[in-house]
Image (cartoon, grey):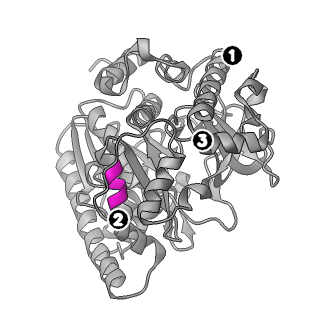
Amino acid sequence: METLSLEAYLKELDFRLRRYIPPANDWTPVEKAIFQPSDPYRVELKTAEVMQFEAIRFAFQHHFEHNQMYRNFCIDHGVYPTDLRRTEDLEKIPLIPDQFFKEHPSGRDFASWIANIFTGELPKINISQSQPNFEQVIQAFNAAGLVITYSSGTSGHQTVIPRDRRTYNLSEYMLSKSAIAMTYPQWQYNMSGYLLMPNPYKTNLYAGKVCQVYFDAIDDITVAIDRQISAKYIRMTMSNEKGIQPTLIRLLSHMASIRMINRIIDWLEKHQKTDRKITFVGAPYLVWSVLNRLKRQGRGFDFSHRGGIITGGGWKIFEGQRLSTAEFRRQAQELLCFSPEFCLDVYGMVEGNGWMVQCPEGHYLHVPYTYYKGMVLDKNFKPQPYGEWGRFAFLDSSALSYPGFIISGDMVRMLEHCPICDRPGPVLEPEIRRASGEDMRGCSEEVRRMFTADIGG
């Protein structure tokens, strides 16, 4: 089968994702920075710098004018849209700690909190309950056309982000475009995929919801966790609550994980007998569980040249144990014959729409630099030069329904360009860790907590 050129390959993706792309005459500088480049990681630096500046300046002015909470925050810091005159001025933009998005009240006060951090005009929200719970508030907002999602840390406090449909579509598009651009020419649109996350149509958990675009990108998908996943369930598994109900939930999760791993192995056996390409997308914990089971049983599969893995959400496997991405690739090659260059990790978070994907050549995490600016902060929260360890922060122009100018709880080191491949933009070194005192979090950790089990035997 003839290999498509990169340009044709990505044009086919745009055709498949056309419902995510607004008409060109509706594009702001944000949409231009996202949709005009063919490959988001191969834009000439000077061109990208102009795109990035115009997109982030547009987003900052948008939030300053349409978000009372953020406008007051900026005034307190003495920063106004007129202060952004050149690229260097972007570092003046006031940053919001990611902790802010989990410090929300309950009931109807929670609904008011969402309304206050939302940028723009909300649709009419109908909450029928006099004392609604967390999930009921989110469902009411989503019934009105929004996409409110959440994530959790080990404390059990959910991070909540309010996306309107425009922001959600930009996030979904860039997740798919970023990952598929890096997998050229391995990705095929008629391949079979296994989603190692909750079904995005059955949860508001960001780890599942963000994978909805996967169903538009390829034809055949099997879902690992194909049932309703509630916020209460996630809270119990993440916070280690005591009592009969949380204990029962963890026991059922233990049993479900064993059945799930068996189903994944059955799926591999089925596709071993075909010539279709396959891909795993989702939490590395579940792939590692399958690899560990195969290794204990002395089994393996040969998917040479027709298999790949895109993981995301962190590499904590069990309490106190981390698996390096290099060791993960080695095991995938040994037991599934997956080529290491097509076992790629994605770094992102519920608070942002920037997706940093590993390059196949060196497995450095490439920062999308036309609409998103990554920064590394020192202990005084001041930007550091390239090559220094510090706390990751970002300016995300595509977050149009909330201020996406955020300080994360992750420690990273950013380089000016990849030391291995020829893509021109900045990269993060692949091993990322949580800052001291921060919750362990991430979509992979959520899945691990839901399904931790003895995977041997």
User: Which mark lies nearer to you, 1 or 2?
Assistant: 2
Q: Amino acid at mark 3?
A: Gln
Q: Residue furthest top?
A: 25
Lower position in the chain sequence, tag 2 or tag 3: 3
Lower position in the chain sequence, tag 1 or tag 2: 1
Q: Amino acid at mark 1?
A: Lys
Q: CA distance from mark 1 to mark 2?
A: 50 Å
Tell me whether the residue at label 1 lies in contact with that at label 2, contact meaning CB atoms closer than 8 angstroms.
no
Residue under the point 35% across and 28% down: 20
Q: Residue furthest front?
A: 130
Q: CA distance from mark 1 to mark 3?
A: 34 Å
Q: Which residues are magenta?
A: 136-141
Residue under the point 39% across and 63% down: 134
- Residue on which the image places disc 2: 132
Give the SS element for disc 2: loop
- Residue on which the image places disc 1: 46
Q: Residues within 10 Å of mark 3 (few under 14, many from 20)?
A: some
Where is the C terminus found, in terms of image quarters?
A: bottom left
Q: Residues within 10 Å of mark 1 (few under 14, many from 20)?
A: few
Residue under the point 78% across and 50% down: 381
Whether residue 196 appears in this view of the structure is no
Q: Quadrant of residue 51?
A: top right
Q: Amino acid at mark 2?
A: Pro
Give the SS element for disc 1: helix
- Residue on which the image places disc 3: 68
Give the SS element for disc 3: helix
Residue 303, position as x, y percentages in the image: 31, 44
Where is the N terminus found, in terms of image quarters?
A: top left
Of 1 and 181, the residue lying toward us: 181
Please indicate whether residue 150 sits to the left or right of residue 93 in the image: left
